[in-house]
Amino acid sequence: MSQAPRGGFRLGPVPHYSTTTRNGTRVSCGGCCLPIPLGCLTGVVALGVPWAVGAIGRRLAAR
């Protein structure tokens, strides 16, 4: 039997991320473009979580 391909984030000289979707499609991203989506995702989470928590707090305080 062959092993299932391993996925995940790998650092090295060239960063690389790969994974397999539920239907078996292989998705990968690597090279110098990888830090851009990771930075965008980090920024969205860093700004979105405090905003969402504040919005929920204001909604509960208005009751």
Image (spheres, helix red, strand yellow):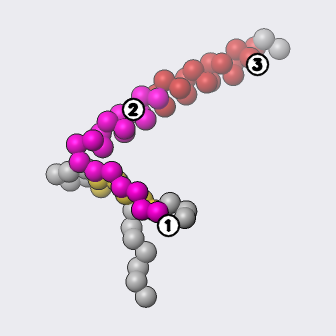
Q: In the figure, 33 relative to 53: above or below?
A: below
User: Dot 2: what SS?
Assistant: helix
> Is residue 21 left or right of 26 when viewed as pictured?
right
Q: Residue at x 40, y 57 (%)?
A: 27
Range drawn in magenta = 25-44
Amino acid of disc 3: Leu
Which mark lies nearer to you, 3 or 2? 2
Q: Is 63 a magenta residue?
A: no
Is any part of residue 20 visible from this angle? yes
Decide which of 2, 53 is in the foreground and name it.
2
Mainly helix, strand or loop, the magenta region? helix
**Figure check: 14 above or below 36:** below
Q: Position of residue 55 (x, y in %)?
A: 66, 18
Question: Which comes before the other along the chain, label 3 or label 2?
Answer: 2
- Quarter in which the N terminus is drawn: bottom left
Quick one: SS at disc 1? Answer: loop
Q: Amino acid at mark 1?
A: Gly
Question: Disc 3 designates what residue?
Answer: 60
Residue 40, numbered label: 2
Measured Cα–Cα span from mark 3 to mark 2: 30 Å
How far, Cα to Cα, is label 1 from label 2? Answer: 26 Å
